[in-house]
Amino acid sequence: MEKPDGVSVVRVGDRKLFECKVAGSPEITVHWFRDGAELQQSVKHVMLFMNSVASLEICEVSENDSGKYFCEVCNEAGTESCTVDEHVILKIQKCDVEDVGAYQCVVANEVGTFVKKIESVSSILGAVAVFRCSVEGSPPLSVQWQKDENWIPEDPTVERTFENKEATLRIPSCEATHGGKYTCQVVNEAGQDKCTVALTAMTVQVTRGNPVSLECRLTGTPQIRVRWTKDGKELQSSRKHHLSYKNNLSSLNMKSTQMEDGGEYLFEATNSVGTCSCKMEPVEVSVGDAVTLKCRILGTPDISVAWFKSDGKLRKSNTCSSDFSNGVATLKLTKTTTFDQAEYICKAENRVGSASASCQVAPKFDIPLEPVTTSEGEKLSLKCLVSGSPPLTVQWMKDRRELKSSGKIRITLVGGAPCLEVSPVSKSDGGDYLCKASNAAGSNFCKSRVTVKGDAHLLASTVVQFLFSASDGGSPIIGYYVEKMRSDGTEFEVANRKLLTECCLKDPFGLPGPPRNPKIIAATATSMTVTWDPPLDNGGSTIQGYWLEKRERGAVYWGRVNRASLTKPSVKGLEYTVLKLIEGSEYQFRIAACNAAGVGPPCESSECRLAADPCSNITLTWSPPERDGGSPIKGYIIEVHEEGSPDWRRVNPADKLHPSTEITVPELKEGKKCKFRIYAVNAAGNSEPAKTGDILVQDILSKRPAHSNIIIIYYGPLFLTDSKETQLLRHLVKRLKVKL
């Protein structure tokens, strides 16, 4: 852009014309501003853009027209602007007494600049996002904000302040639509300055089984090509991953997330100008070794690169050096120590803005958990050692249930050493324990199997004998309470829950044994019905109910199906229908019984079964044509049309004819109507098809006890053409039998 003269002096009542020469790719839009406020086309302000010249004409200039004017032009490639000051001569038409005095003209030429620029922000959806910067310059100063090259209008969801030369833009609740490029522009009479950064709105946590949607809004010159990758592998639109790109918004949707869906997702956009993406991988290295971190950077020159560690900017030293060439920024550490373990950030800047990428070390268990065997009443202590980039969070789980510090459970994390203590231990504390460590780079876990044995000092049955009291205190004795205390204990506790009328104590009820013969007897696309037999051993107490667990094929953990408390099981009886399954997934189930003593061990798992609507097979038989048209019948083509489908589907392979007059059609859905047609084929071609009427598969099954098959007779013409192009008309009588 070629801008006009910097300062213009105009008399009141004159006309003033500003012109700017513009060059660039169409389409170009032009905006004129005075002191930061956009001017609109009017009788007073006439704006034109012709022959690459943008013009603004001010008719009948007044004192109010003084100020700083600038022209801004935009296209898909970017934005450019130029400024000019207009000054109006003070002209006093008629002097009065009050006009006598000293007049002063003050000229300010300190351009507004940024002392502290805004920085790019990554915010979780629903969280607060804040841009903050400090400016200096001659007053009056004004600040405007843009998003994606558009001025931000008054919006209750965006808060803006400018006090004490500090400008702030605050988004109280970040949404996906808030993501994009933000520009802060400071303007005064001497000039203007601007800085641009990015806001990335993201979701970082998803509960297993819930849906998730990742979105990224972008701008650029068409045609833009986009792609999503997970852990470096490109994702394609499928039943599990639904990809869409519409109105410059690219999205990745998953209906039901699983444990294996955790990972690093990368969105990449490419056009003829270049590629926009950013990603760095964690690096693992031994103490004393050398390590090199690399980050590929794309953008418009000139680009400056700086490296940062969690405790500040890195400086060149004997053990640390950096370089940027051929679009690759490198950081070299010649001899690593334990103090070098941290998050490293590579920050790149050019005149448009800045971008950064970070590298963290995912958690690693240097000393994992080990299997533990302990006895009732003892103290259980599980310890491990984990390393990784801070901050680290540790989670303990037992049999897939999260543990918290409370009561007899104590959880600590000191110096990378997670510890779980349970005291005193009971039989119910036995099971599978898992310690999971997480940070921004990922997560890791280790497991331990804890076995709790009975107290070796207690007998299976204890008989307490004592003499009756010599005195009943004036009232007959109706029973006895017995108290017990361990040899290393300090207090007695009541051993019998009920009043004893006999002098013998026995152990409480035992846990029930595992149920038997788990089977899946029915399945649909979203449900399965499971049956089982009761356990042989009820532990001496009536079975109160059962707990069901399900697991998908290939999964590690089991998930509870019924969510009632242990004391009030929601599953009664020996049959249960599990709902809300995912169509196309394979499931297996196991069952545990519970009685007054608690929940017993689960039974062996059932076989895996696919969640899909039930299907049936139908066998068709027919008679060959009475006449073959002068050429032997080579075979038959069989087609089926199912209810809800727009097309006929060929049953036999496309490259083969069916040789016989009988065929079994598999996987027909129950409750759906279907019909068939059959073609006879000879050297001349295909006959006209013989067709059946609608057949309801479910109706056929329901009539099976009364009728072993259904016979339908059809009459239809057979058209065959020989090599002499003569046409023969024959009638084909077909008898179709539908066998069950």
Image (tube, rainbow, N blue to C red):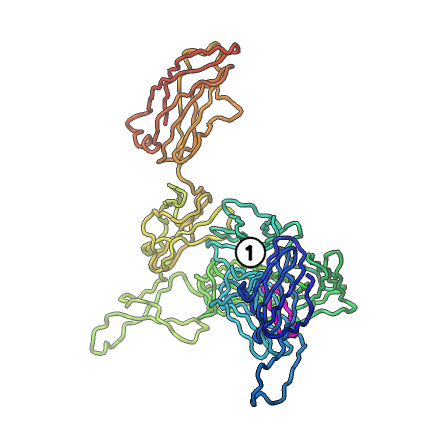
Q: Is residue 274 left or right of residue 639?
A: right
Q: Residue at x 43, y 61 (%)?
A: 428
Q: Would residue 29 be visible to someone looking at this image? A: yes
Q: Position of residue 468 (x, y in %)?
A: 27, 72
Q: Say above or below: 703 vs 720.
A: below
Quadrant location of the C terminus?
top left
Q: Is residue 689 left or right of residue 373?
A: left
Q: Nearer the viewer, residue 334 or 631?
A: 631
Furthest residue to the right? Answer: 318
Q: Residues within 10 Å of mark 1 (few under 14, many from 20)?
A: many
On the rendered structure, is 506 left or right of 197?
left
Camera-nearest residue between 533 and 476: 533
Magenta-drawn segment:
181-197
Q: Position of residue 303 (x, y in %)?
A: 71, 62
Q: Quadrant of residue 565?
A: bottom left
The residue located at (62%, 72%) in the rendering is 68
Where is residue 392? Give x, y as percent: 58, 66
Q: Position of residue 309 (x, y in %)?
A: 67, 68
Q: Quadrant of residue 426?
A: bottom left
Would you say residue 183 sits in the magenta stretch? yes
Q: Which residue is mark 1?
A: 216
Pick the quarter of the image with the N terminus.
Answer: bottom right
Tell me the amino acid under the disc marked 1.
Cys
Residue drawn at (52%, 58%) of the image: 449
Q: Is residue 579 magenta?
A: no
In the displayed structure, would residue 739 be above or below residue 366? Answer: above
- Kind of element beneath mark 1: strand
Main secondary structure along the magenta-highlighted residues: strand
In this view, 579 is above or below 280: above
In depth, the one of 370 and 241 nearer the eye is 241
In-front residue for pair 678/376: 678
